[in-house]
Image (tube, helix red, strand yellow):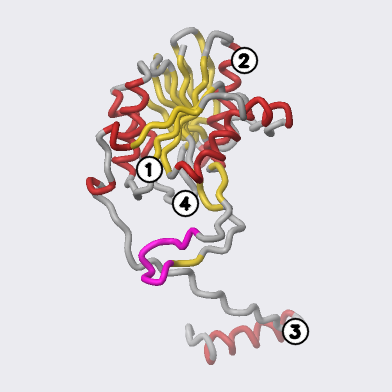
């Protein structure tokens, strides 16, 4: 029973982002890379499934430059994944090419009983790779999953929609589930787990072996801009009446919105 968990490295939210000289991409020098937070829920769910089904084999899989993403796979294996697949790519791939690379690699491995992923990556925030991967593999998928009940080959999945409403879906395996916060509580990588991870296999596959190239990407980015610095907060002194009067004056004379 083969279980795949798709992970991605993203810049740490505390990293100060800088742009390249031509503003066409992010300057990656000095960036601290971490596993996408939503993918941590996917890893935990895959490991929990393995704990309940000892015959299952959990494989972490990612796309990216070998020199960087290797650390993410080691972390996933330290948490409990059995092995990893590294799709080595130094090119920038769009969501479609990324999904194609993942699909081709999983098919080369003989397919999957279950595939887990995060609902989105906090850098691109497209929520697209997981569903596209499932469509390429022609398997059902449910995203934004907050609760999963397993019963043989049948899954009952609850997902959160806008307004706090919950939807319930029933699907059969093979299937892809994209995890949301609250699905579980990801475990930390223990020291023994870290030591064991160094001995677990990482299979490397170049994108050229999967028929994927950045030249086929349909989406490209240009002219990035950093958010403008926020204006300093101005505190208004006095009682409520004086504050209200001064606020109206500021809105009229300085902000010029009245």
Q: Earlier in the sequence, mark 2 or mark 3?
A: 2
- For the residues bearing labels 2 and 3, Cβ distance under 8 angstroms: no
Describe the element under mark 2 as helix, strand or loop. Answer: helix
Q: Earlier in the sequence, mark 1 or mark 2?
A: 2
The question of residue 174 being in magenta is answered with: no
Q: Residues within 10 Å of mark 2 (few under 14, many from 20)?
A: few
Q: Earlier in the sequence, mark 1 or mark 3?
A: 1
The question of residue 22 being in magenta is answered with: yes
The residue positioned 29% from the left and 32% from the top of the image is 209
Describe the element under mark 1 as helix, strand or loop. Answer: loop
Residue holding disc 1: 89
Circle count: 4
Image position, residue 13 (x, y; %): 58, 54
Cα gap from disc 1 to disc 3, whole angstroms: 57 Å
- Vertically, is 62 above or below 32? above
Residue 167 visible somewhere in the drawing: no
Residue holding disc 2: 51
Q: Residues within 10 Å of mark 3 (few under 14, many from 20)?
A: few
Residue holding disc 3: 237
Residue holding disc 4: 123
* Image-based side of 191 in relation to 211, left or right: right
Does the magenta stretch mainly form a helix, a strand or a loop? loop
Magenta range is: 20-28
- Vertically, is 171 above or below 252? above
- Vertically, is 254 above or below 18? below
Cα gap from disc 2 to disc 3, whole angstroms: 60 Å
Q: Residues within 10 Å of mark 1 (few under 14, many from 20)?
A: many
Cα gap from disc 4 to disc 2, whole angstroms: 31 Å
């Amino acid at each position: 029973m083969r279980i795949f968990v798709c992970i991605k490295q993203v810049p740490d939210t505390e990293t100060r982002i800088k742009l390249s000289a031509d503003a066409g991409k992010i300057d990656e020098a000095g960036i601290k890379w971490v596993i996408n937070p939503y993918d941590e829920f996917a890893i935990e769910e895959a490991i929990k499934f393995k704990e309940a089904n000892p015959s299952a084999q959990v494989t972490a899989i990612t796309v990216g430059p070998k020199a960087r993403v290797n650390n993410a796979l080691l972390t996933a294996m330290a948490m409990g994944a059995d092995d990893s697949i590294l799709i080595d790519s130094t090119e920038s791939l769009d969501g479609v090419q990324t999904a194609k690379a993942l699909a081709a690699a999983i098919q080369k491995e003989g397919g999957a009983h279950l595939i887990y992923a995060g609902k989105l990556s906090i850098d691109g925030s497209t929520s697209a790779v997981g569903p596209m991967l499932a469509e390429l593999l022609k398997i059902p998928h449910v995203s934004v999953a907050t609760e999963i009940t397993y019963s043989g080959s049948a899954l009952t999945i609850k997902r959160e929609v806008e307004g706090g409403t919950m939807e319930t879906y029933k699907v059969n395996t093979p299937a892809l589930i994209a995890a949301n916060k609250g699905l579980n509580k990801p475990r930390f990588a223990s020291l023994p787990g870290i030591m064991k991870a160094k001995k677990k296999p990482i299979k490397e596959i170049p994108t050229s072996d999967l028929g994927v190239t950045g030249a086929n990407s349909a989406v490209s980015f240009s002219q990035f801009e950093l958010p403008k610095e926020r204006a300093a907060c101005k505190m208004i002194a006095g009682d409520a009446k004086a504050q209200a009067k001064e606020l109206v004056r500021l809105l009229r004379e300085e902000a010029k919105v009245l």
